[in-house]
Image (cartoon, grey):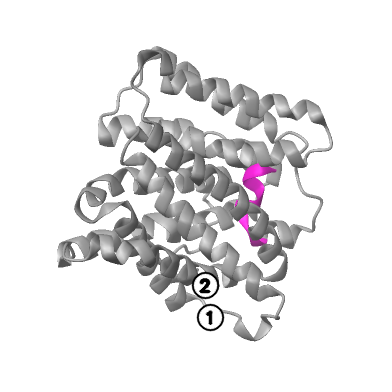
Amino acid sequence: MTALLPPSPRRPPWASALAAMLSVQLGSALSVPMIDSVGPAGTAWLRLSLGAVVFLAFVRPPLRAVSRGDVPVLLGLGTATGLVTVTFLAAIERIPLGTAVAVEFLGPLTLAAVRSPSRKVLAWPALALVGVVLLTQPWNGHVDPVGLGFAALAALGWATYIQLTQRIGDRFTGMGGLAMTIPIAAATAAVVGIPQAAGHLTLGVIGAAAGLAILLPVLPFALEMHALRHMTASAFGTLMALEPAVGVLLGLVVLHQRPSPAQLAGILLVVLAGAAAQRGGRRRRGVDADAARPELDLIG
């Protein structure tokens, strides 16, 4: 994996975190044309499968270190990753990218609030929910309930994913956990993805999927790993709260999805809620454990 992202003392950690966000949202935006060809599940299956190939090419799965108790957690994490990918892509097939990201962000925000010893932090998911209402503007009668339902499932899956990732991140360092769970995620997506993509696969589609796999999941994980090794978890989590805004920006630039002033205000509320939820939310763990899995720190 270091061959994909050689260490550079000149690259500031916040730049790596921002690049990871851009890679995730650009990969999502560029997935939309492929969704038209092979469907959201087909796109998820191709992207995860080719991502798994890249991970396995660079990282040796630590299979000998796997205990019997690790197996259900690894299977659960891989399954959750596959389901989140499928449901999120199904969401952006129906609703704007920025809206889907904001709804999905409610998952880790709510999880962070529920796990906090202070009940006051429950105000932040509530504030983010107000932002989502401004984004969807149900009073206009243009709400896509199916798209929002898929985004809500992705939010639930993301929260589950984070909980399981914490356990795997405490057990395996570096990219070892990913080398085991991403293939499981690909197999999960294959259940619906292969039938959906059947008859529509071409060399062009496979080549495009390979490029999307580099954008997500391969490159963001490597970039986030660099960021977490050089900045605190709280700072990283606060920075990652910008992701819904990045989703809106790339939705505008790549997909020409122009938000209204009310929707921009909604995104601002989601970003503010996400940033505020990170304060005081860092896990009390060792430096090495914190750096092992960047996804943990998205919720502090």
In the image shown, does 20 or 27 lie closer to the viewer? Answer: 27
Residue 144 in view:
yes
Point out the residue furthest to the right here.
117
- Where residue 200 appears, as percent x and y from the top left, is 17, 62
What residue appears at the point 40 percent right and 71 percent down from the top-left corner?
54
Apparent side of residue 175 relative to residue 101 in the rendered image (left or right): right
Q: Nearer the viewer, mark 1 or mark 2?
A: 2
In the image shown, does 271 or 11 lie closer to the viewer? Answer: 271
Residue 232 in view:
no
- Where residue 242 appears, as percent x and y from the top left, is 52, 33
Q: Quadrant of residue 203?
A: bottom left
- Where residue 157 appears, as percent x and y from the top left, is 55, 50
Magenta residues, start to end: 292-300
Apparent side of residue 285 relative to residue 128 in the rendered image (left or right): right
Number of numbered tags placed on the structure image: 2
In the image shown, does 234 or 300 lie closer to the viewer? Answer: 300
Q: Earlier in the sequence, mark 1 or mark 2?
A: 1
- Where residue 198 appears, as percent x and y from the top left, is 21, 66
Q: According to the image, label 2 marks what residue? A: 179
Amino acid identity at mark 2: Ala
Q: According to the image, label 1 marks what residue? A: 60
Q: Secondary structure at mark 1?
A: loop
Name the image quarter holding the C terminus: top right
In the rendered structure, find residue 204 and report the number of the disc placed on it: none
In the image shown, does 213 or 197 lie closer to the viewer? Answer: 197
Amino acid identity at mark 1: Arg
What residue appears at the point 68 percent right and 28 percent down from the top-left corner?
276
